[in-house]
Image (cartoon, rainbow, N blue to C red):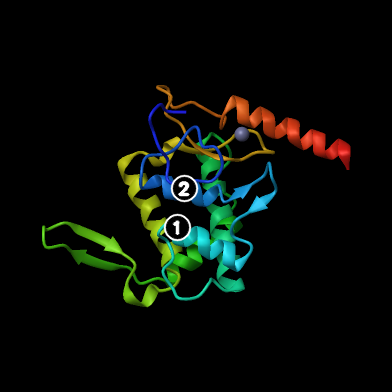
Amino acid sequence: MLLGMVLPLWVPGEETKPAPMPLLLVQSFVNTWDSDHGSDLLLDPAAARAWLTQAGLWNAERPPDPAELHLARGVREGIRAMLVANSGGPPPPPGDLLPLQAVARGSRPALQVSPGGQVSLGPGPADRPGAALLTLLLLIRDAQRDGTWQRLKACGNPDCRWAFYDRSHSGAGAWCDMATCGNRIKNRRLRQRQR
Ligand SMILES: [Zn+2]
């Protein structure tokens, strides 16, 4: 854990390798699925709404519907496949990127100029309530341009695939965290034995 660093409440799990904001949002979105606990924050509409709202990604007066959640989970796994590539794995299978491409096709981002002269691209009026996924895509675009994207990776343990931010000097880190990843494998073996 980085000493003195307080993470927002919406960051899932015990995150020891957090990405800088706002890329932390993409990392946390990927980690809404936890292979260790077999838990998924994007399965139940009420739970998904709670998490997305906390993370500032949802402001509709209703929870996401099943189709929206299905698309969100597809986008999440597409991003995970991209993070596997970032950690030296194969490029994402084309099928895995279809949900992201669907979001890109269906969105109409809007260019805005703030009173201070800051030019930004964000979800347009027509993008509600799917703005969460478009927002994540725009964050990925920014990270790909500023060079932080390559450091957001999926754990090299195929049973884990937790998204972590590689702050190592070499940028060659491949594992989420020795202690927690080891525990994940141990817990899984224990559960398998108990079954
Ligand atoms: Zn791991």
Per the image, the residue denoted by label 1 is 54
Mark 2–mark 1 distance (CA, rounded to whole Å): 8 Å
Frontmost residue, 36 versus 120: 36
The percent coordinates of residue 53 (x first, y second) are 45, 62
**Secondary structure under badge 2?**
loop
Residue 82, relative to residue 75: is it above or below?
above
Q: In this rendering, would 167 be left or right of 90?
A: left
Q: Quadrant of residue 57?
A: bottom left
Which amino acid lies under the numbered mark 1 shown in the image of this protein? Gln
Frontmost residue, 162 versus 80: 162
Say few, some or many: other residues with alpha carbon within 10 Å of mark 1 (under 14 / 14 to 19 / 20 or more).
Answer: some
Q: Do labels 2 and 1 touch, CB within 8 Å?
A: yes
Per the image, the residue denoted by label 2 is 9
| View extreme (left): residue | 116
Q: Total of numbered circles in the picture?
A: 2
Which amino acid lies under the numbered mark 2 shown in the image of this protein? Leu
Q: Residue at x 50, y 52 (%)?
A: 29
**Secondary structure under badge 1?**
helix
| View extreme (top): residue | 169
Q: In this rendering, would 36 be left or right of 87?
A: right
Q: Residue at x 36, y 77 (%)?
A: 126
The quarter of the image that holds ligand 1 is: top right
The percent coordinates of residue 30 (x first, y second) are 53, 49
Q: In this rendering, would 52 be left or right of 21?
A: right
Marked residue nearer the N-terminal end (2 or 1): 2
Q: Quadrant of the C terminus?
A: top right
